Image: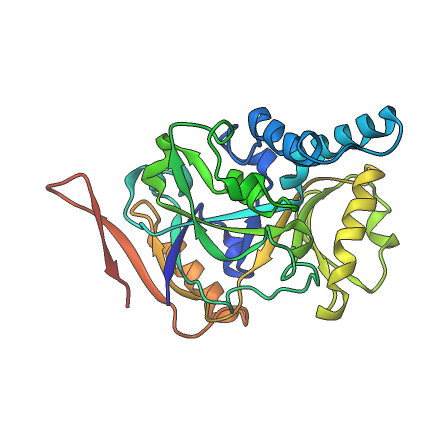
Amino acid sequence: MRILYKYMPLRSSFFDDPLLRLTPPSELNDPFDSKPTQAGIEKKLKFFFDDQDEFEGPESDFRNIRTTYEGDLKNGLDQFGIISLTEDPYNLLMWSHYANEHRGLVISIVCDPSVFEYHDKFTEACGVSKTKPSRVSYSNMRPGQQMPDSTIYEYFEHNFYTHFAMTKGNDWIYEKEYRYLLRLTEADAAIVDINSANWISQQGDDIRITHIQEKTYKIEASCAEKRDILPWVLAISQGRSEISNVKLFKRLKPNSITGIYFGSRVSGDEILKAREGIEKSPLFGQSIRFHRSIESQDRFEINFEMLC
């Protein structure tokens, strides 16, 4: 049973509903992350088109098919979202960068198959999806000129996409990162800005809408049987500019969180409020242990004390 950790800011909404964001590659903080290089794409194109038998048909059809496939290779990972975890809850850089300068928290998660509930019928059949967290590899070279044969000489793109999604630059090695890689259609909820005053009244009983602040709302299916409707509602509403700033989330299942580690700058009142929210929410288990980080007086490091 592997325990991994998630750094995050202190968000009161998390203690009502334990949602983790599915971040698409275009919104990751590293512009190199999960971006297929042209060198890698050219290798894949060469295997499919230059190394195969002669194409039977007009030259224009061949060029169109090749151009379409090249676009698919460039943008295919945009259909997926990443949930990043780490094996290290003590890292001071990550506490500063991802946990709001020690004003946030870290949660410990039991990463077994019951962490999330999957409902997209294509997820298990999808060779790109990672429903168990996979370790990220680090390198000083971007994938492209040097890629494993398995990423090129396959008649699908499973290993190709996986290689780009799971390879980062050496500067990130301190993160000791693991990743879930899931289809965006697996989202359990979305946080959106609603631009149309009439949009809410136009939604039927299949969609549950919860106000967060100002024009920001949480959107989800009204029940488990309706969850496949959510991606369609979001896509159509975005296309009509009725909603914007869409962020997709996956919900942790009860008992998947084993511990919560508050930063050294989190106040006692904030900790108390968070604990009260968790105890009231049916979406959390009953065996969560609470900790607070303590700054060492001798070394540049932190330790954790358990809270009663």
230 or 213: nearer the eye?
230
Q: Residue at x 82, y 52 (%)?
A: 200
Which x, y percent locates residue 254?
Answer: 51, 70
Classify residue 170 as left or right of residue 119. Answer: left
Task: Name the image colouring.
Answer: rainbow
Where's residue 110, x and y in %? 41, 65
Which residue is at the front of the view, 146 or 206?
146
Picture mark count: 0
Q: Position of residue 3 (x, y in %)?
A: 36, 61
Which quarter of the image is occupied by the N terminus? bottom left
Residue furthest out toward the left: 298
State the residue at coordinates (53%, 59%).
18
Q: Eyeballing the image, is 85 above or below 117?
A: above
Relative vertical location of residue 42 with respect to residue 82 in this rendering, above or below: above
Q: Residue at x 40, y 41 (%)?
A: 137
Quarter of the image containing the C terminus? Answer: bottom left
Residue 41: quarter of image? top right
Q: Is residue 100 visible?
A: no
Left or right, 144 with reference to 127: left
In which quarter of the view is residue 242 placed?
Answer: top right
